[in-house]
Image (cartoon, grey):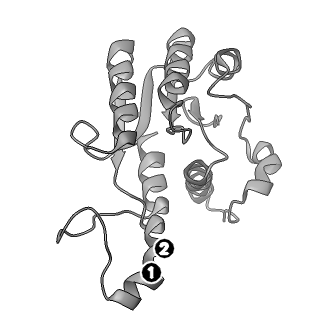
């Protein structure tokens, strides 16, 4: 996504759960600056993005040629991590390499909280992505987040029934964040 009244910004994964909320947050901020009201964003409203001054480019993590074309003129890239476990590193490498070829000045990338220490299998893909960012030479910002609060929704009924929310933290507390809060933070960074 690129907004004409700011330095060129591209949001990858803008049709996903987090990406949609980032775009909605950015649009709400733009509307607020213009003293207007932003209708709630929905994926099916995507064609209306162009009516709101947003350039829409279709690009695929797995297709470097589409990324190369989409990133032209982009100053800041928000890389929302792929959700294709086992393919994330290759897809992220494509994004980072295309960003480098396009001369992107800054990459903000979503990552896992404490990816460097986490035993989660998914953490290894985030560690490798972080190494790719370091090796790229492009300045970058890591947006590390814990588990989304929404991910706990499936556990509400059993937790109420057993008077406990079970997880891997033992007696530890849960440190989660709502997806909307993560989107707001990403929008501020980008």
Toward which corner of the image does residue 82 lie, by quadrant? top right
Q: Which residue is mark 2?
A: 153
Please name whichever residue, 179 or 174, is drawn nearer the observer in this view of the structure.
174
Position of 122 with respect to 68 (left or right) is left
Quick check: 67 left or right of 46?
Answer: left
Residue at 59% x, 36% y: name it. 12
Q: Is 14 left or right of 168, judged from the image as shown?
A: right
Picture quadrant where residue 102 is located: top right
Whether residue 137 is visible to the viewer of this picture, yes or no, is no
Residue name at image x 61 percent, y 37 percent: 5
Which is more toward the observer, 126 or 168? 168
- Residue 108 lies, with reference to residue 175, above or below; the image says above
Residue to which mark 1 is pinned: 156
- Residue drawn at 40 percent across, 41 percent down: 122
The CA distance from mark 1 to mark 2 is 5 Å
Disc sitting over residue 78 in the figure: none
Q: Is residue 134 above or below residue 155?
A: above
Residue 92: percent from left, percent from top: 50, 26
Q: Are marks 1 and 2 in contact (CB under 8 Å)?
A: yes
């Amino acid at each position: 996504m690129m907004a004409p009244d700011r330095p060129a910004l591209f949001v990858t994964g803008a049709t996903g759960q987090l990406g949609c909320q980032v775009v909605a947050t950015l649009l709400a901020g733009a509307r607020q600056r213009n003293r207007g009201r932003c209708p709630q964003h929905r994926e099916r409203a995507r064609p209306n993005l162009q009516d709101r001054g947003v350039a829409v480019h279709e690009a695929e993590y797995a297709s470097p040629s589409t990324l190369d074309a989409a990133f032209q003129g982009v100053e800041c890239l928000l890389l929302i991590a792929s959700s294709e476990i086992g393919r994330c590193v290759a897809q992220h490498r494509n994004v980072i390499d295309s960003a480098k070829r396009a001369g992107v000045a800054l990459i903000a990338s979503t990552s896992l909280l404490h990816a460097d220490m986490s035993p989660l299998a998914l953490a290894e893909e985030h560690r490798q992505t972080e190494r790719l960012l370091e090796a790229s030479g492009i300045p970058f910002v890591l947006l590390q987040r814990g588990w989304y609060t929404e991910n706990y929704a499936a556990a509400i009924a059993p937790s109420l029934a057993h008077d406990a929310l079970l997880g891997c933290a033992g007696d530890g507390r849960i440190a989660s964040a709502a997806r909307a809060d993560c989107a707001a933070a990403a929008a501020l960074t980008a």
